[in-house]
Image (tube, rainbow, N blue to C red):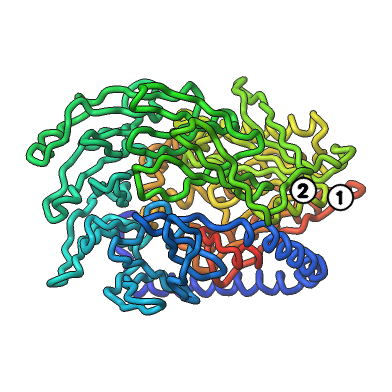
Amino acid sequence: QEGTKVPSKRKQNASIVTSDLLHKNLAQEQENWNDISPTYKAMTKRIKEKLEDLHNMYTLNSGGPRMRFGENVYFEENGCIFLAKADDGKGFLFLIWENLQLDFFIGYRRTWISPLKAYLHSEPSATCALWSHMALQKTKCLCYFGVINSLEWAANDVLYYTTQKNLKCQNVFMTTFTYQKHTKLVYTEQDARFFVDLYCTKDRRFLTINSNSKTTSEVWLVDCRHPFESPALVQARTTGVIYHIEHRRDQLYILTTYGEPAEYKAILTDNYIHRSNLDTYCSGKENWQLVYAPQKKTKLVDFEMFSDDCIMFLKNTGHLYLDVISFVSHSVQSIKLPTWACEFELEPHPEHTTSTCYFQLSSPVHPPKRFAYSFKENNLIEQAVQEVPIITNCHTTRLLAKSKDETLVPITVFHNKNSKELHRRPLLVHVYGAYGIDLNMSFKEEKLMLIEEGWILAYCHVRGGGEQGLSWHRDGCQHNKLKGLHDLRACITLLHELGFSQPKHTALAAASAGGVLAGALCNTDPALIRAMVLQAPFVDVLNTMMKTHLPLTIEEQDEWGNPLEDEKCMKYIKSYCPYQNIKPQCYPAVFITAYENDERIQLSGILQYVQKLRKAALDHASRTSKKGNRIPNIILDVQANGSHCDSSWEHSLNE
């Protein structure tokens, strides 16, 4: 009966039964995988060799980003970190460490090197230690931490950092290293929907403590000249208002969604900062004045502040461009970037007084290419790397599909220029459509390999993602989630109508939350595709959102709704949830990769989905005797290690 307390022993027994069943199902799937994987042994060997060749050709030779600190430049080559004087290109060996995760050290936009040349070392266990560079290749351990999410230096010897527990990051600590070592708790976020991270303004005048939910944010300032003083609140959280802080010449610049339209825009505060009135200054949004707003349906991807200029990195219907704001001439210059480019990556610029902004452009089939924008010359310069071959045989096309409600949905298509009879070529369609996050369109060796082998690649920028700004996300979340499904259907239909492949040669790929729309299309329109490839897919929205004990459920309500308190929400989720809508019909072939210890996507839910899907496909086959009727392969590969957030080259290659 409802309200009856279950004895702890019964709970324990139920838990043991559930665990035993999970291990039994897992063992069965492993047996299935062992039976079928030898079929692909020769193909796997060929693909692996090809990918390694492409990686050596394009990635290893492209050169990593450089990070400048004062007169020194740090860069990574062949697993080592080098330090060079900025004026000459020669560098001496700064550090060798076999287990050092260089992505954190150099690739991370918010620098983790202090002026004292201390740096963060991330162990394979994800715990962190702080080390100090004493002399050539000699180091000294200063401090061990737990699992760290973000950290910033407020001063030479004052470090602020956030810790992560159960996928949540809600505490900020401060540690000092010189004189008497000291650590104290600076800030705690009480609301489970909010996640805390740290950022230093470009001029390193302020450290910002940012507390963000999916829809709302709040920022506290720490004066880096007085890092031991209490943080000051800029603007109390207001539902629906997100904001981020930058600083230039005693004024705050705020990137915020405040005001209409509810998209990101740049705001300038109307009074100056003085140390004595910082608390008074941070008095609220009534002091905010509009400086810059992008055009309609344009996404502000990133921005970078310099002493006399600011660069806005923008995306509109798949095209990338820059808006360069001059604080001297009070002008805005718009620069369109190469048509093949799909992704920006800003290089670290710790020196805000620099006269050049460096960034990289890439696409799924174009390796990163370095560009520089010169403020003095007002022009864009391509930084050529001679060792990296230029991709010339790939054609990029941008289309617009008309969805069910007449909304135009962008599609980016890549194919080999030499391919003939495109309607006979295999097509791989990509989709995500959640959390306001764009489809990942950075360079991947496997995508270039597919182009070289005659495949067509299509990226459907459906609602729920962030490709056309925050309104694009709002139109595809909670009670609008079905719009993303309608968009995906319209995109695939248009591709086929225009002669890009046909249903029997079409595969659909998605990862994580992208599994919702992919799995839903598999239920509603299985005839549109022949195969579906999912990586750690979210396929049981309803049951997951009913379990508030899971670490992310409360936080996820902004995206999916709260079925526990809203019956309409429950019915709506049930109408599209992949697991809930499986039925006997002719399904496409399905390949799913899952991770045994994935904290975000529960393995038990994926196992139940696979078993239910197999049963439905078999039921359909047994009921029909149509000539040529087939039972689709439904394969689950469970990885003992890794997670769907692991982006290392070795992990990607093995998969």
Q: Position of residue 114 (x, y in %)?
A: 30, 61
SS at badge 2: helix
In the image, 251: left or right of 455?
A: left
Camera-near label (2 vs 1) is 2
Could you say which quadrant of the image residue 2 lies in? Answer: bottom left
Q: Position of residue 401 (x, y in %)?
A: 67, 27
Could you say which quadrant of the image residue 83 lies in? Answer: bottom left
Amino acid found under the numbered disc labelled 1: Asn
The residue carrying mark 2 is 451
Q: Position of residue 54 (x, y in %)?
A: 72, 59
Q: How many marks?
A: 2
As measured in the structure, the alpha-carbon distance from the residue carrying label 2 to the one carrying label 1 is 31 Å
Q: Closer to the camera, 186 or 483? A: 186
Disc 1: CA contacts within 10 A as few (<14), some (14-19) or many (>=20):
few
Q: Residue at x 20, y 25 (%)?
A: 270
The residue carrying mark 1 is 629
Disc 2: CA contacts within 10 A as few (<14), some (14-19) or many (>=20):
many
